[in-house]
Amino acid sequence: MTYVDDLSDITFDAEGEDGDLVRRTLATRTWTDGGWATVMILFDERAKDRTTWRQPKLALIRLRRAGEGWKKQSSVTLPAVHASMLREELERNADKLAVPYAQGREPDDP
């Protein structure tokens, strides 16, 4: 994915050659700010045995407005253990991240 018309079009679902789902999206969240967007996708992938699923991973994708759509600027994928450590660190530093919203502006709805 390098370009999407709409942010809701972003998914990590993928099928193998046999048509079976090999990667599935578990949760998504999108934040926008002007011409920029950040998309969080929680997903998992099938193990090689094709019967079990591996631990979830977290993908963070940064996009910028390009014409009528969105172009991928950068992305990072974190394994479950790193995503969990990131969550802990964000919680530990939440007071340092608190910023007042601009006048008349509210955060995106969950």
Image (cartoon, rainbow, N blue to C red):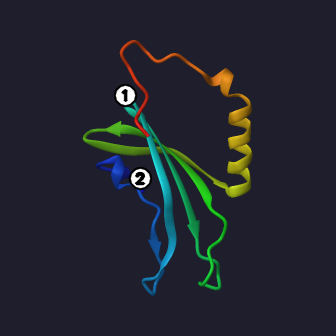
Residue at the spot of label 1: 34
Q: Amino acid at mark 2?
A: Thr
Quadrant of the frame with the N terminus:
bottom left
Extreme residue toward the front, this view: 110
Place of residue 25 in the rendered image (x, y in percent of width and height, measured from the top left): 49, 62
Residue at the (56%, 52%) spot, across then down? 59
For disc 2, the neighbor class at 10 Å (few under 14, some 14 to 19, many from 20) is few
Q: Nearer the viewer, residue 105 or 68?
A: 105
Q: Is residue 103 left or right of residue 67?
A: right
> Sequence-wise, which precedes: disc 1 or disc 2?
2
Q: Is residue 30 left or right of residue 49?
A: left
Residue 108, numbered label: none
Place of residue 64 in the rendered image (x, y in percent of width and height, measured from the top left): 40, 37
Residue at the spot of label 2: 2
User: Where, by quadrant of the figure, is residue 53 drawn?
Assistant: bottom right
Residue at the (63%, 24%) spot, across then down? 97
Place of residue 35 in the rendered image (x, y in percent of width and height, measured from the top left): 37, 31
Q: Amino acid at mark 1?
A: Gly
Q: Are marks 1 and 2 in contact (CB under 8 Å)?
A: no
| Cα–Cα gap, marks 1 and 2 | 19 Å
Q: Nearer the viewer, residue 46 or 17?
A: 46
Residue at the (56%, 18%) spot, across then down? 99
User: Where, by quadrant of the figure, is residue 94 drawn?
Assistant: top right
State which mark lies toward you, 1 or 2: 1
Q: Nearer the viewer, residue 6 or 51?
A: 51
Residue at the (41%, 52%) spot, across then down? 2
Circle 1 SS class: loop
Image vertical order of residue 88 relative to residue 56, above or below: above
Quadrant of the frame with the C terminus:
top left
